[in-house]
Image (cartoon, coloured by chain):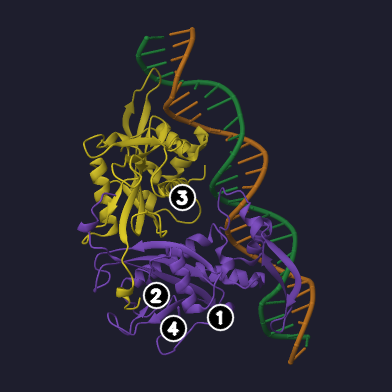
Chain colours: A yellow, B purple, C orange, D green
Amino acid sequence: MNQKNKKYPRPAVTVDVVLFTVIRGHLKVLLIRRKNPPFRGRWAIPGGFVGPRESLEEAALRELKEETNVSGVYLEQLYTFGAPNRDPRTRVITVAYFSLICANLVQVRASDDARDARWFSVRRLPRLAFDHLEIQRCALDRLKNKLGYSNIGFQLLPEKFTLTELQRVYEIILGRKIDKRNFRKKLTQLDILRGCSERRMAGVHRPARLYSFVQQKFSTRKGKGILFSF
Amino acid sequence: MNQKNKKYPRPAVTVDVVLFTVIRGHLKVLLIRRKNPPFRGRWAIPGGFVGPRESLEEAALRELKEETNVSGVYLEQLYTFGAPNRDPRTRVITVAYFSLICANLVQVRASDDARDARWFSVRRLPRLAFDHLEIQRCALDRLKNKLGYSNIGFQLLPEKFTLTELQRVYEIILGRKIDKRNFRKKLTQLDILRGCSERRMAGVHRPARLYSFVQQKFSTRKGKGILFSF
DNA sequence: TCAAAAGTGTTGTGTGTACACCCATGT
DNA sequence: ACATGGGTGTACACACAACACTTTTGA
C-alpha cells in the first residue's frame, strides 16, 4: 500500500444483495427492473453505492431495508466482483452479499413510481443486467454448500415451523428428496430444536407439531465434520 | 444502482494478499515493513492499489509477482474489508486474497532499498498495521477449513513429495497430530496420488517414495461429503 | 370410512479412529 | 548392531442410507 493515490483513479464501489426466500415450494430471488440506462428495462439484483461513513455491511443492510422494510435478517458477504468493464459507464467494483428471509415476514416495495420489484424463481430468471447472472449463480452455489454445514436453512422459515416445512426448505434448495425419518432423526440428535406445545392444523390430516430453532445449542456443537449431510 | 455518482465520494480500492508457505515445519506468512506513515515501521500484509484496467485478481497476481517473483501459484479471494476508518488517511476498501506457495519455489525480494520483507510464523506475528491482524486471522481460518474439503494442501509442496511431507503440512495447519496409517489409507482410497518410481534419501533411514498429485482424478470425485476429515 | 399428511425404528454398509510392528538405510 | 524414519493391517464405533406401517384429523 504505497502512497500512489494520485496515479490511480478511484473506482465507484457498490454493494449488491442477492435476497432469497421460499414461496409456495419454490426458491425465489428478488430482482428490480432498471428504469435507466444502461440495461434499461432489464432486471437486476438490488444494490447501491456505499456511503462515505458506512461500512460495507451497513450499506448492504440499508439496501435490504430499502427494498424489503425488514431488518434483523441473515446477511453474509459473498464475493467481490471487479472486472474492469462490468459496468459500461465507469469502473464499478461491487461487493456482493447474500441474504435469506422468511417470506411471511417481508412485504416487498413493489411497483411504486420509482421501482418495479418482483420475486423470481431461481429456475426461471429473466435476462439480468451487468454481470448479475454470475453474481446470482455464485450466491446460489454458496447457499447450497452452506446448507450442509450450517444452520442457515432456518433463516427461511418463521420462528415456529413444522419439521415437514423445514424438510421442504432443504429439498427445494438441494433439489432432491430427503428421507423423512432420516431427516428427523438427524435433527433430533443434533439437539438444536425445541418443540413447543402448539400444533398446527393445515388441511384434513393429523396436526403437526411446531418447533423453534435453538441458536446456542447449535453454536456450541463441536465443529468437526459435517452437520447436515442429507 | 441509481445515478447518484456525484453524491458519493469514491473510496480507494486496494488488494492485499495473505501469502502462506511452510518452512521447516512452521506455517509462515509474508509480511512487509512499512517505510511510510501511517503505521511507519509496522509490518503489513503486502498489497496495493487496483489499477484502472486490471481486474481484482489481476491486481492480486501482480502484487504477488512483485513480492515473490513467482506466478502460477494458488490464489483465492478471501473477503473484502471496508470499515470506514480502517485507513486513517482516507476511505480505503481492500479486497483480501490468500495464496499458497511452496517455499522451495520462491525467492522473496527481501531487504532492498524500498522494502523489508520477511516470513513470520503465524504463531508469532508482530504488531500489524491497519486491520491486517483481522485479515490474517480470516485467511488462516479459511485455510484450516478448506484443508478439510479441498486439495489446497498440495499447493504448499513441490511437485514431488513424500507422504510424510504431506502429512506434516496437514499437521502444521490443523495444529494436531494425525495417525500415519489412517492418513495414508485415506489418501490412497481417494486415488489422487500417483507414486513415481523415484525415492528420496534423507538421513540415515529407509528411503521414502515420492508421489505427485493427480488433479483430474480429484476433481471428478463425487462432491458429496467431506474429502479429508482427519 | 376415506384421504392426506404426521409420526416413528431397525438393519446393513461404509467411514473414521485407535493401535504396534517390521523394513531399509548409513554409521 | 543400532538409530532413524518409512511403510503396512485389523477391530470397533458411529453415522449415513434404505425402507413401511400406524396415527390423527375433517369431510
| Separation of residues labelled 4 and 1 (CA atoms) | 18 Å
Q: Are marks 1 and 2 in contact (CB under 8 Å)?
A: no
User: Mark 4, mark 3: which one is toward the viewer?
Assistant: 4
Residue B224: where, in percent of width, then height? 56, 47
Per the image, the residue denoted by label 3 is A149
Per the image, the residue denoted by label 1 is B24
User: Mark 4, mark 1: which one is toward the viewer?
Assistant: 4
Image quadrant in which you'd find residue B149: bottom right
Answer few, some or many: residues within 10 Å of disc 3's Cα (few below 14, many 20 plus, some between 14 and 19). some
| Separation of residues labelled 3 and 1 (CA atoms) | 34 Å
| Separation of residues labelled 3 and 2 (CA atoms) | 30 Å
Residue positioned 63% across, 56% down in the render? B218
| Separation of residues labelled 2 and 4 (CA atoms) | 10 Å
Question: Which label belongs to residue B117?
Answer: 4
User: Callout 1, which amino acid?
Assistant: Arg
User: Callout 3, which amino acid?
Assistant: Tyr
Q: Are marks 3 and 1 in contact (CB under 8 Å)?
A: no
Image quadrant in which you'd find residue B71: bottom right
Q: Is residue B61 left or right of residue A71?
A: right
Q: Earlier in the sequence, mark 2 or mark 4?
A: 2
Q: Is residue A137 left or right of residue A19?
A: right
Q: Are marks 4 and 1 in contact (CB under 8 Å)?
A: no
